[in-house]
Image (tube, rainbow, N blue to C red):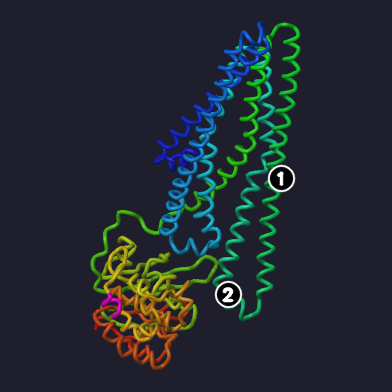
C-alpha cells in the first residue's frame, strides 16, 4: 500500500483535514508575525528617540503581541479538537475496512496466522495510520511554509546569513537519516512482540480450564512475563533511540543558533545590521528550530506508519474467498455430488484422494470412518470453507464454485462438534439462525426450535429463561446444554441441507433418545449429513457411508437415487 492509497482512506474527511490545514496555516502566519513585532518592540525601546516619545507605539505593539498570542491559543484549541475528532473517525473507518475484509477471507487465512497478528491488523495498525494522517501529515505544509517564510524574511534582512542557514539544512536531514534508520525495523519488531503478547493472553483465556486442570498457572504467568519483558525492552529501546535523535537535532539547532548569534553580533557592532533587524533575524532563526526539532519525531512516525501500511496491506491485499458478480444459488432441492475430489492441506498428507459420493435430495446420510478419513473435509468443501484442488462439488447439478457464496451458505446449516456461541442471551443465540441477513425470529419460532433440539425444558428452568446470558462461548452452560442451543440455532435456519457433526455427543442417553424421536420430523424434506459413531444417531440414517484415507470405502445405501 502506498501513501497515496492511505491518503485515499482519508478522502471522506478532506473537508475536515482542509479546515485543520487552514487553521495551521493561520497559526504559521501568526508565528511569522511575532519576530517582526519583536523587532519593532526593540525599535520602540532602544532605537533613536526616548521611551516617552515612543510609549504609544510600544504599548500598541505589546497589545498586538497579547492579541496575537490570544489568537494562537484559540487556534491551538480548535486544531487540537478538530484533530482528535477527525482522528477518531478515520481510525473507526480503517478498523471497519480491515474488519470487513478479514470477515471475507477464506478460513485458510486464519489457519495460517496467529489470532494476535490478525487482531493487531484490525486494532493497532489503523491507530498508527490514523495518527499519521491527522497528527503528522497535516503539519508538513504549515511547517514547510514556516521554514520558507522565515528564510525569506531572514534573506530580506541579511541574504548572506540566510544562505548560511540554508546550507545547514542538509546536516539536519543527514543526521535524521543516519540515526533514525533503525526506527522502522525496531517498530516492526515491537509490533510482532505486541502480537505475541495478545496471542498468549487470548490463547490462555480460552485454555483456562486446561491451565487450571494441569496446575500450570505459574508456568503460563512466566511465559506471559517473558513476552511482556520483551515488549518492555523494545519499547525502551525505541524510546531511547527516539530521545537520542531528538537530542542530537536539538543540540545541532542550539549550535547553529549560537553561531548565528555570534555572526549577528559582529554585524551589529560593524553597523551593517540595526538592532531591530538583529532581534527580528534572531527570532526568525528561533522560528526555524521548531520544525527542525519536530523532524526527528516526524521521521519516526513516518517509519512506523510505513510498517503499519505494509502489514495492513497484507490483510487488504488478500484475495477474497468468493468472486463478486456470480449468479445467486437457486432454491436448493438437496442433491449433493462430490466428483473425484482431491484436497491436500499445506504441510499435511492428502485429506481427500479422489473422493466420490452421490447423495439424493431428502436423504439422511451418516458419514463414518476413523479420524483423518476426510469426513470434516467433505463438509468444509460443501460449505466452500475450502476448495478442491481437483474435482467438483455439485448441488442440484450446479457447481457450487460458480455461484454466489452467501446465497449458497444461507441454505445450508452446520452444527459443528466444537460449539460456537456468542456472549449474549440464549434467545439471541438461537435467533441468530433466523431468516434474513440480520437473523431474527419470533418467540414461537425460537421456542419451537429449542423444543426440537431438546433445549426448551432446561432453558425455562433457568432463573432468566431465554434471557439468560451464557458467557463467552457458552461457558455458563454445560457441554450438553451448549450443544442443544447450537442445534436449536441450526434447526431454526430451516435449511435445505443440514450438517450435524456428532450432534448428540454431549447428550445423556435419555436426551439422545428424545432428540432422535424428534429429529425424524425435523429431518423431513431436507438433506441431512450426519458425522457420528453413536448407534442411536446412526439409526436415523438412510445410508451409512464409510471413508478411509481420503476415499469412500463403503456405502450401505446402494443407489442414492433409487
**Which image quarter: residue 53?**
top right
In this view of the protein, which residue sits in the foreground, 387 or 383? 383
Structural crowding at the residue carrying mark 1, measured as other residues with C-alpha within 10 Å and reported as few (<14), some (14–19) or many (≥20):
few
Structural crowding at the residue carrying mark 2, measured as other residues with C-alpha within 10 Å and reported as few (<14), some (14–19) or many (≥20):
few
Residue at screen point 28% across, 71% down: 441
Residue at screen point 53% across, 41% down: 132
Does 53 appear above or below 380?
A: above
Residue 287 on the magenta segment: no
SS at badge 1: helix
**Which image quarter: residue 516?**
bottom left
Mark 1 — residue? 240
Mark 2 — residue? 208
Instruction: Assess whether mark 1 and mark 2 are in contact (beta carbons under 8 angstroms).
Output: no
Question: Residue 232: which numbered mark, if any?
Answer: none
In primary-sequence order, the first of circles 2 and 1 is 2
Report the magenta residues as a range.
443-447
Image quadrant occupied by the C terminus = bottom left
Q: Position of residue 426 (x, y in %)?
A: 38, 75
- Apparent side of residue 556 relative to residue 297 in the rendered image (left or right): left
**Which image quarter: residue 198?**
bottom right
SS at badge 2: helix
In this view of the protein, which residue sits in the foreground, 543 or 151? 151
Does 54 appear above or below 253?
A: above
Does 16 appear above or below 97?
A: above
Residue at screen point 47% across, 39% down: 82
- Apparent side of residue 204 relative to residue 551 in the rendered image (left or right): right
Residue 446 on the magenta segment: yes
Q: Position of residue 478 (x, y in %)?
A: 46, 83
Tell me, yes or no, if residue 335 can be seen here: no
Chief secondary structure of the magenta portion: helix
Q: Position of residue 361 (x, y in %)?
A: 26, 77
Residue at screen point 31% across, 66% down: 408
Amino acid at each position: 500500500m502506498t501513501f497515496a492509497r492511505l491518503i485515499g482512506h482519508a478522502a471522506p474527511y478532506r473537508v475536515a483535514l482542509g479546515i485543520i490545514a487552514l487553521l495551521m496555516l493561520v497559526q504559521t502566519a501568526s508565528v511569522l508575525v511575532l519576530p517582526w513585532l519583536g523587532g519593532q518592540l526593540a525599535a520602540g525601546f532602544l532605537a533613536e528617540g526616548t521611551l516617552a516619545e515612543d510609549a504609544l507605539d510600544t504599548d500598541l505593539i505589546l497589545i498586538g503581541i497579547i492579541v496575537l498570542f490570544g489568537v494562537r491559543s484559540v487556534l491551538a484549541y480548535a486544531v487540537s479538537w478538530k484533530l482528535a475528532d477527525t482522528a477518531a473517525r478515520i481510525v473507526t473507518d480503517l478498523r471497519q475496512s480491515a474488519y470487513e475484509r478479514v470477515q471475507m477471507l477464506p478460513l485458510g487465512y486464519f489457519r495460517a496466522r496467529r489470532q494476535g497478528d490478525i487482531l493487531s491488523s484490525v486494532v493497532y495498525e489503523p491507530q498508527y495510520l490514523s495518527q499519521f494522517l491527522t497528527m503528522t501529515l497535516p503539519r508538513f505544509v504549515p511547517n514547510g511554509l514556516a521554514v520558507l517564510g522565515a528564510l525569506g524574511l531572514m534573506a530580506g534582512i541579511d541574504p548572506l546569513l540566510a544562505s548560511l542557514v540554508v546550507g545547514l539544512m542538509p546536516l539536519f536531514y543527514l543526521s535524521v537519516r543516519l540515526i533514525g534508520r533503525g526506527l522502522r525495523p525496531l517498530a516492526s519488531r515491537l509490533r510482532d512482540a505486541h502480537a505475541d503478547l495478545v496471542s498468549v493472553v487470548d490463547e490462555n483465556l480460552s485454555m483456562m480450564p486446561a491451565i487450571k486442570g494441569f496446575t500450570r498457572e505459574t508456568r503460563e504467568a512466566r511465559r506471559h512475563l517473558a513476552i511482556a519483558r520483551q515488549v518492555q525492552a523494545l519499547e525502551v529501546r525505541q524510546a531511547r533511540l527516539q530521545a537520542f535523535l531528538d537530542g542530537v537535532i536539538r543540540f545541532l539547532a542550539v549550535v547553529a543558533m549560537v553561531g548565528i548569534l555570534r555572526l549577528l553580533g559582529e554585524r551589529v557592532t560593524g553597523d551593517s545590521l540595526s538592532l531591530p533587524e538583529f532581534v527580528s533575524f534572531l527570532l526568525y532563526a528561533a522560528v526555524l528550530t521548531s520544525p527542525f526539532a519536530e523532524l526527528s519525531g516526524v521521521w519516526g512516525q513516518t517509519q512506523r506508519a510505513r510498517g503499519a501500511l505494509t502489514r495492513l496491506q497484507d490483510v487488504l491485499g488478500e484475495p477474497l474467498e468468493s468472486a463478486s458478480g456470480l449468479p445467486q444459488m437457486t432454491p436448493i432441492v438437496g442433491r449433493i455430488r462430490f466428483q473425484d475430489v482431491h484436497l491436500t492441506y499445506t504441510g499435511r498428507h492428502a485429506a481427500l484422494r479422489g473422493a466420490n459420493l452421490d447423495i439424493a435430495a431428502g436423504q439422511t446420510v451418516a458419514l463414518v470412518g476413523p479420524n483423518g478419513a476426510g469426513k470434516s473435509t467433505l463438509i468444509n468443501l460443501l460449505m466452500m470453507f475450502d476448495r478442491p484442488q481437483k474435482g467438483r462439488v455439485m448441488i442440484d447439478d450446479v457447481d457450487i464454485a460458480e455461484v454466489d457464496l452467501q446465497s449458497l451458505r444461507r441454505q445450508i446449516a452446520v452444527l459443528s462438534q466444537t460449539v460456537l456461541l456468542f456472549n449474549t442471551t440464549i434467545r439471541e443465540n438461537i435467533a441468530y439462525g433466523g431468516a434474513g441477513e440480520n437473523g431474527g425470529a419470533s418467540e414461537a419460532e425460537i421456542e419451537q426450535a429449542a423444543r426440537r433440539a431438546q433445549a426448551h425444558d432446561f432453558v425455562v428452568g433457568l432463573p432468566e429463561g431465554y434471557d439468560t446470558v451464557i458467557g463467552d462461548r457458552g461457558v455458563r452452560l454445560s457441554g450438553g446444554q451448549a450443544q442443544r442451543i447450537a442445534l436449536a440455532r441450526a434447526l431454526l435456519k430451516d435449511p435445505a441441507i443440514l450438517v450435524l457433526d456428532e450432534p448428540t455427543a454431549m447428550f445423556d442417553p435419555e436426551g439422545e433418545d428424545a432428540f432422535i424421536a424428534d429429529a425424524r420430523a425435523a429431518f423431513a424434506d431436507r438433506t441431512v449429513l450426519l458425522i457420528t459413531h453413536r448407534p442411536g444417531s446412526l439409526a436415523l440414517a438412510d445410508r451409512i457411508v464409510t471413508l478411509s484415507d481420503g476415499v469412500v470405502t463403503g456405502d450401505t445405501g446402494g443407489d442414492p437415487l433409487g
